[in-house]
Image: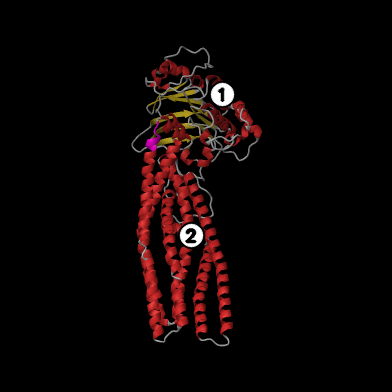
Amino acid sequence: MAAEFVVDKSFTSDRRSAVRFITYHVMRHKWVAAALIMGAFVNAALASTVPYFIGQAFDEIQQPDDGTRQAIIVLCLFIIGAQAARAVMQFIRNYSAELFSQRIERDVRDELYASLLGKSMEFHDFQPVGEIMARVTNDVHEMNFMMNPGFNMLVGSSMFLIAPIIAAPLIYPALIIVPLTFVILHLTVQIFFVRSLHPLAEKVRASFGRMNARLAEALDGLQVIKGTAQESAEVGRFNELTDTVRDYYIDQGRVEARYLSFLLLGLAFVAAFAHAGYLYQQGLIDTGDVVAFIGQIYLFGFPVFSSLFSLSRIASGYASAGRILDIINQETDLGSNPAGYSEDVKGAITFESVDFGYIEGTQVLHDISFSIEPGQTVAIVGQTGAGKTTIAKLINRTYDVDSGRVLVDGVDVRDWSLAALRSQVSVIEQDIFLFSRTIAENIAFGQDEWSQEEIEASAKKAQAHDFILTFPEGYETKIGQRGVTLSGGQRQRLALARAFQSDPPILVLDDSTSAIDSATEDRIQKAIWSAAEGRTTILITHRLSQIRWADHIVVLRKGRIVAQGKHEDLLANSVDYQRIFARYDEPSSTDDATPMNDMDALSGDADQTKTNTE
């Protein structure tokens, strides 16, 4: 299976169907399953002996003699011993079942998580996060419930169906009629019950996923909801989804309420009494046999009452297994190519007639061709939507081109080992992502070993050291999810520090100083100049000072290259490039701190003005 990321695991599950998937994970722990089945069988067998001993006691009482008292004491001891042994076997069964279910949940969750990490961005771009979270958490947990109590109770109750069929004819051969008939009818009812329950269980799981997706999206966009006073509208939309989940659960309850095995159990008791009474009147069995036989029929109560619950859990778990497989089995066009080219990157980048679109039939880039020499600094400029960020994502193979080639050191990125390529290309995006971890852990992310001195040195280069020390816990300060407790400028400086820490041969800065004030930008820009020495640096920027500093400039317009070259040449010969400077006098130095955040001058409009404050 193609994947961007593949974990070396001790197993590869059978993913051809939900049944095979579940069976594979069950068989991975076959000794635990065997202990569960053994415990269930012995438990049922010992339970079946109790009615027999009670029947023997009745016979002793009806025909008393000198040894009756002693016989009854012995029978009581047998019953006590059988129940004590049952307790031990029930412990073994339940312990095995819980161990069984927890191991399967762990294995399935690990497998699903590794699969999600291996999916391409094209997959994740179209998957609601809440829906994925529902499968990773709730659906996987449903598989746990499917094993215990579902599978545990089903196995245990099945043994209670077998025991009376074996014990009844040992009392008197004709007594097998009622228990055998009941078991056949009960299994028939279960088949139809599961068939009716399964589609509803699928609808319950699917509706829960949609509800969870809406919840996650609303929480992620809470600031927008509050800013537009849409709380009531969102509550209404969410209520519609919760009502759908409720309705499917009610429909499932209606099916469970019509579980006919309860009726069959009552009829089985009537038939058993009638049959045993007839045989008793005929003198074929005695009182003790009647008591022992009815006691065997009484054992059917456990499988009838438990099967309703266990089958519901199994139906839900089976539906969840199908939903998990739907995710795992979706392949990606981006393979990790672990045997691919994996040398140290020197920094040469070439685009050869590259076309690309995120959606089939809609092209973002058209015939893009340019080259970057190792150690060069290249600025990519253009209006909003021109395709600047897309070019950056093709370099580290976040996406694959539709046609043409992207080469790194003369090797097509598709021929590189994906891990080797991405570990040597650092991209700082405009939308900074920080983890809910300490500041030090965020700066050192991606490195197995690091020292506090290295972390602080990187932070100082990124002009982040001073503001970090203002926090009470300094570098050990835990930041909120996505860095929401920090300002935009602070987040970008931490991202820069993370890039400096990894020291990559290729550094891509995607408008990485857009949320930083001009004074801080001057200091960071000097750090970037220092960091750019000896490495290939790609600047996607709206800052004139950074554009002029580049060795080579590529000008984009509507996904096409309209000009490229040095700043002086483009300023003299490119009308599109000249528009960038149309509203400014000639700068007197390259340290001009005046930002040009309106690159939409290329297209003659200004709809994306950004604020240069934290």
Q: What stretch is highlighted in magenta?
A: 229-234
Q: Does the magenta stretch include residue 461?
A: no
Question: How crowded is the residue under tag 1: few (<14 C-alpha within 10 Å), some, or many (20+)?
Answer: many
Q: Does the magenta stretch include residue 233?
A: yes
- The residue that mark 2 highlights is 149
- State whether residue 540 appears in this view: yes
Q: Residue 356: x percent and y percent?
A: 39, 35
Of the residues shown, which amino acid type is indicated by label 2? Pro
**Residue toward you, 407 or 27:** 27
Of the residues shown, which amino acid type is indicated by label 1? Ile
Mark 1 or 2, nearer chain start:
2
In-image side of 518 versus 266 (left or right): right
Q: Nearer the viewer, mark 1 or mark 2?
A: 2
For residue 91, the mark is none
Q: Residue 487: x percent and y percent?
A: 53, 28
Q: In this view, does 275 lie above or below 525?
A: below
For residue 524, the mark is 1
